[in-house]
Image (cartoon, helix red, strand yellow):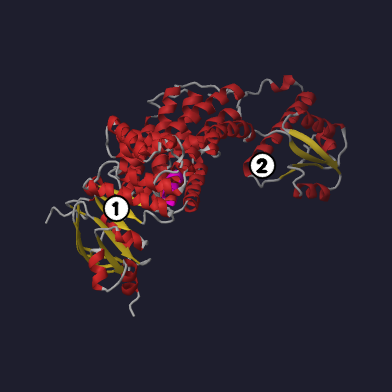
Amino acid sequence: MRTILYLIRKEFIQIFRNKFISKAIFAVPIVQMLLLVPAITFELKDVRLAIIDKDMTPESRGLISKLEGSSFFKVTFSTFSEKEAENLLLRNKNGVILHIPSGFGKDLITGNGGKLMVSVDAINASSAQLSWAYLNGVIRDYNAGLITENIGVASLSPLPRITITNRYWYNEELNYKYYMLPGILVILVTAIGFLLAGLNMVREKEIGTIEQINVTPVRKYHFIIAKMVPFLLIGLVDLALGLVIGKLAFNIPFEGSILLMFFGATLFLIAVLGLAVFISTFSGTQQQYMFVAFFCMIVFILMSGIFTPYDSMPQWAQDFNLINPVAYLMRINRMVMLKGSTIYDISTELLSLAVIAVCFTTLAVRRYRKTA
Amino acid sequence: MNDQAIIVKDLVKKFGSFVANDHLNFEVSPGEIFGFLGANGAGKTTAIRILSGLSKPTSGTVIVAGFDVYRHTEQIKKNIGYMCQKFSLYEDLTVKENIVLYGGIYGMSRNLIRERLGNLLEKLRFREYENRIIGDLPLGLRQKLAFSVAVLHEPKIVFLDEPTGGVDPITRRQFWEMIYETAERGITVFVTTHYMDEAEYCDRISIMNDGKIVALDTPGNLKRQYDAESVEDVFIKIARPG
């Protein structure tokens, strides 16, 4: 036990004597939070809309002014040429084209029902669907307005109608910052866990100081634990720093127990640090390590459900996520921060993380060789 | 027989088809200064890594400080010190921090570490360097310090792999004075070197060529046997016959 303390002290001295690393570990969370949280949003607004109005009647203008009044759309182009509108779509100048054919207003008044055509740039499928849904909503609204105007409210009242009241739980204002911030915090601790400890280990190999350690009676697990502990603590400090910034800059709600979230993060960091040390035993140079670690990190983060709904992933991806520590912490952070989930609600996640942590760390200790 | 510091019988180490150590046989007595000579690539470092438990032999018997290298590697590590030219101390730690670290690793008590640290700084006239970063010290000082750290825990045997490479003659002389002192305390010194004048200081020397030990005796006997004026002449006659 004393040996571990001596080794841990050595790691801390080395980390804080390194002028660059010692500053970077505090600068990175600040920059990452302030930059990524407001930048990454799925909120759809100001979709650029091109309008081909071949009708030019009060009816078509009424529809256009309704669209202009909505915060989702910004009418950026009006033209009579389909070709020009398509060109704009091609050059990414517009997201949606609304085509109002001539005779639209007349058909409405004569009771034949108007026809419209909408073209949506669907490179990003989900934003295309959203744009269409919003546009559809505005048009339906306009349509309903027309019906009341022409037929009168009274005639509608006998028809039975379903009234829906809805409430968005846990994030009532649908604020994407609230959704992304817990995820960005996960990325933050992932980077600390994955990159620093492993690189540190491989650096000792490159310089050769690891030989001097291997020739002493130091136990393998002492050395590995001493490599993990400082970065575990730094990861937790960075997490705290990230939370403080989240509170100050974005006023993020924190419904659950902070202690519970840090407990989850501790298990997570042990898992990731164990994996990092495991990878480092295969790597002879920092370059080799970076390549493998970066690859794992990207796969883990992108599959974790940070950007995409977890339940919509194919089954095999969900199966893979059983061993993906990032996926567990992603859920834990969001559940604890936004829903106020308790230790019982996230017990599966915590237990899985604990198992992964034990497995990866054991692998690392077993793979590490003092004698070649 | 078990009181020998090192016993090596028919030691073979192969890397694929390359034979780095070809049936080595020798014994080293406690307190002896044993010079391990050979041209670059003769297999010295391979042997020293096996003796210090960093690498496993392919076959043969190797007993170090009474422990078998196959089964009791960690026991051996408690009883030896090791220093090599390339890598020794942490360059981003201070003199004191390095000594405290290695003292702690060998399980020395806080008081003992403090006491040895004091003695060491006194003996090397190192007081002023106590809180200096190793990386800022000249090579000669670093090597002297590395040696002191290697014997800090008073091991039975210390392995030195080219400890004086790139060091100036005065520092080399001082370094050998430290080696003598260490041997007088009963610590066995196993040293490889390319400086033939240093070989003269050893109690016995062995000379390796192409993975085999081709000569092993006291410097005096070897000079007589090969009718040479110095160990250097002996070395040249053996390493490049004809």
Host chain of mark 2:
A
| Front one among B99 and A57 | B99
As drawn, the label of residue A128 is 2
Determine which quarter of the picture holds residue A121.
top right
Residue B205: horizontal and vertical position, in percent?
Answer: 26, 62
Boundaries of the magenta span: A199-206
**Left-right relation of A86 to A202:** right
User: Is A123 one of the magenta-colored residues?
Assistant: no
Q: What residue type is labelled 1?
A: Phe
Residue B144: horizontal and vertical position, in percent?
Answer: 38, 46
At 44% from the left and 27% from the top, the residue drawn is A261
**Left-right relation of A83 to A154:** right
| Front one among B130 and B72 | B130
Determine which quarter of the picture holds residue A31.
top right
- The answer as to whether the residues below labels 2 and 1 share one chain is no
Q: On the image, numbered disc 1 is attached to which residue? A: B159
Asked if B194 appears above or below A300 in the picture, the reply is below
Asked if A362 appears above or below A71 in the picture, the reply is below
Label 2, label 1: how many angstroms apart (C-alpha)? Answer: 71 Å
Q: What residue type is labelled 2?
A: Ala
Residue A186: horizontal and vertical position, in percent?
Answer: 50, 34
- Would you call the spot at circle 2 few (<14 residues within 10 Å), some (14-19), or many (20 or more)? some
Determine which quarter of the picture holds residue B154.
top left
Dominant secondary-structure state across the stretch colored magenta: helix
| Front one among A217 and B187 | B187
At 29% from the left and 53% from the top, the residue drawn is B159
Q: Decide if residue A302 is in sight here.
A: yes
Asked if A5 appears above or below B21 in the picture, the reply is above
